[in-house]
Image (cartoon, rainbow, N blue to C red):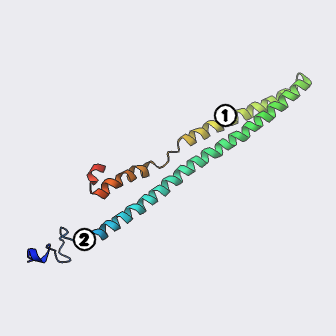
Amino acid sequence: MSTPADGPLRTAPGTGGDDHRSIGDLLRAVTEDLSTLLRQEVALAKAEAKESASSAGKGAGLLGGAGVAGHFVLLFLSVALWWGLGTAIGNGWSGLVVALLWAVVAAVLAVVGRRSLKSAKGLPQTQETLQKIPNAAKGHEEQNR
């Protein structure tokens, strides 16, 4: 048995007494836990960023397609107007039908692309868990629940 002059009581290794671990052991455990936590947060951020970037990329591609389709709308409307005015009746209507078809394609691509861009959520889970770190570092993990 230790006396007060010997310093704090310590349990023998392997006896399961965590109440009196050395400061070095505690610091090592905190460092390991913090390292694990940071690695997990980085992995979570990567996964969320990949998902968000994929959704944003799809939306951007669809909006790019809407831009190309919009360009064709202007091209065929211009041809239809030119041809319609040139002959007054007849051949111009075929160009107008093609232009209207491209207008429908552009509208559909724009709506789907815009919806896809709005669904990109960023990194919500990472933000939530990062807000819990200060409480966990202070030993107040119960406040995170």
Secondary structure under the numbered disc 2 in the rendered image: helix
Task: Name the spot of residue 6 as percent of width and height, x first.
Answer: 12, 77
Query: Relative to residue 54, is residue 5 depicted above or below?
Result: below
Picture quadrant of residue 8? bottom left
Residue in the image at 35% along x and 55% along y:
133
> Between residues 19 and 48, which one lies in front from this camera angle?
19
Task: Name the spot of residue 131 as percent of width and height, x first.
Answer: 37, 51
Disc 1 or 2, which lies upstream in sequence?
2
Residue in the image at 77% along x and 37% along y:
72
Secondary structure under the numbered disc 1 in the rendered image: helix
Q: Amino acid at mark 2?
A: Ile
Query: Relative to residue 137, is residue 90 depicted above or below?
Result: above
**In the rendering, which numbered label is found on residue 23?**
2
Query: Relative to residue 75, is residue 41 depicted above or below?
Result: below
Picture quadrant of residue 86? top right
* Residue 91 appears in the picture as rendered: no
Is 70 situated left or right of 110 in this image? right
Task: Give the quarter of the figure containing the N terminus.
Answer: bottom left
Residue in the image at 53% along x and 54% along y:
50
Query: Relative to residue 120, is residue 34 depicted above or below?
Result: below
Is 73 situated left or right of 144 in this image? right
**In the rendering, which numbered label is found on residue 107?**
1
Classify 10 Å Cα crowding around label 1: few (below 14), some (14-19), many (20 and above).
some
Q: Amino acid at mark 1?
A: Ala
Task: Name the spot of residue 82 as percent of width and height, x first.
Answer: 87, 28
